[in-house]
Image (cartoon, rainbow, N blue to C red):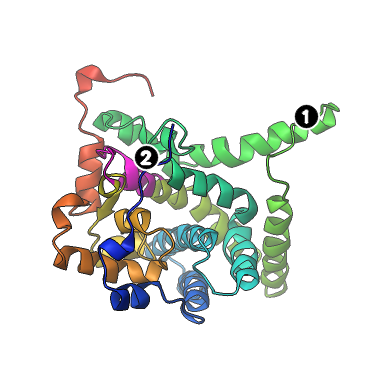
Amino acid sequence: MAAVARIDPKTIFTPEEWSRLSAPSFWRGPALVLGAWAVIIGAGGLFVLWPNVLTYGLAVVLIGARQLGLGILEHEAAHGGLHPNRRFNDWMAEWLCGGPVGGSLRRYRPYHLAHHKYTEQEEDPDRSLSAPFPTTRRSLARKAIRDLTGQTFFKQRIRPALQRMGARIRGETLKPPRVADRPGLRFWIVNGAAIVVLSAAGLWWVWPALWIVPMATWLPLVTRIRNIAEHAVVQGDADPFTHARTTLANPLERLLIAPYWVHFHAEHHLFMYLPCYRLEQTHRLLIRKGYGPRLTLARSYRDVLELAASRPPAMEAAS
């Protein structure tokens, strides 16, 4: 199947507007990465200083959301948007964004660019994320419970690692990945250094309690919500404006579910090499120029989830 149609930005924006939107920044990408880590350290420090149920719950959701934020910034780097210098862009993605949460820019970039090339078509490698929707409320609730109880984390991360380990013990030949990389090594280098530093301070328990627990609970849930919001139940026809959804997130949703302008996903698919920090400005310009009716918009993540769970219970299939 042919690649999806593209919009020429010159047909929408003036040269001056496009120049402002597309101009790379040498400092904003690194500032976003540092900001993510500042929130993680600050949320963890809040619980360490004032340990109680409230501060722990707050730390878990804030850190889990910033773990998603690190993945979003790795996604930004896949488009070359973290820094104009390609080497520094990729280094930040590998060691400061993807590495700590087990991501691999080398593997993600070709996979993700294929998603942009074939959005919502059979060749789209992310098609399976949106295809099951709409589903029923009960099905969506079961998925959320699996996320929050660590079942999704075990299925996606622990079980495959155990299966690979078992295959090596049995002497079986493992199928090599399409792109050679060692994200597990980076994960343990970064996290091992954190464990050593925390243990030296007498805080060894911080790593499992404030890094792994958010990764096993809140991160899978908000990752699922993000995936649903971006492409589930969109029209996805020949018009590029219909390939993705923008969710008009409120400040609390941006803090806990949608960091770093990820909710402006329609704009990202229209102009995929624009830096994430210019997407909100792009959205405002599109609305001002009369393109609002062509955009797929949702007023909130609550509205997105209601749409995703709009299938009648009588039509429920096993999930």
Q: Is residue 71 left or right of residue 172?
A: left
- Asked if 147 appears above or below 170 in the picture, the reply is below
| Crowd rating for badge 1 (residues with CA inside 10 Å; few <14, some 14–19, many 20+) | few
Residue 118 - label: none
The residue lying at 24 percent from left, 38 percent from top is 235
Q: Quadrant of residue 249?
A: bottom left
Amino acid type, residue under disc 2 in the picture:
Ala
- Image marks 1 and 2: residues in contact by CB distance under 8 Å: no
What's the residue type where badge 1 is placed? Ala
Residue found 24% across the figure and 18% down from its top: 315
Farthest bottom residue in view = 27
Quadrant of the rendering where the N terminus is positioned: top left
SS at circle 1: helix
Q: Which residue is mark 1?
A: 167
* Residue 316, percent from left and from top: 28, 20
Write down the region rendered in magenta: 224-239
Q: Is residue 277 left or right of residue 38?
A: left
Q: Which residue is mark 2?
A: 144
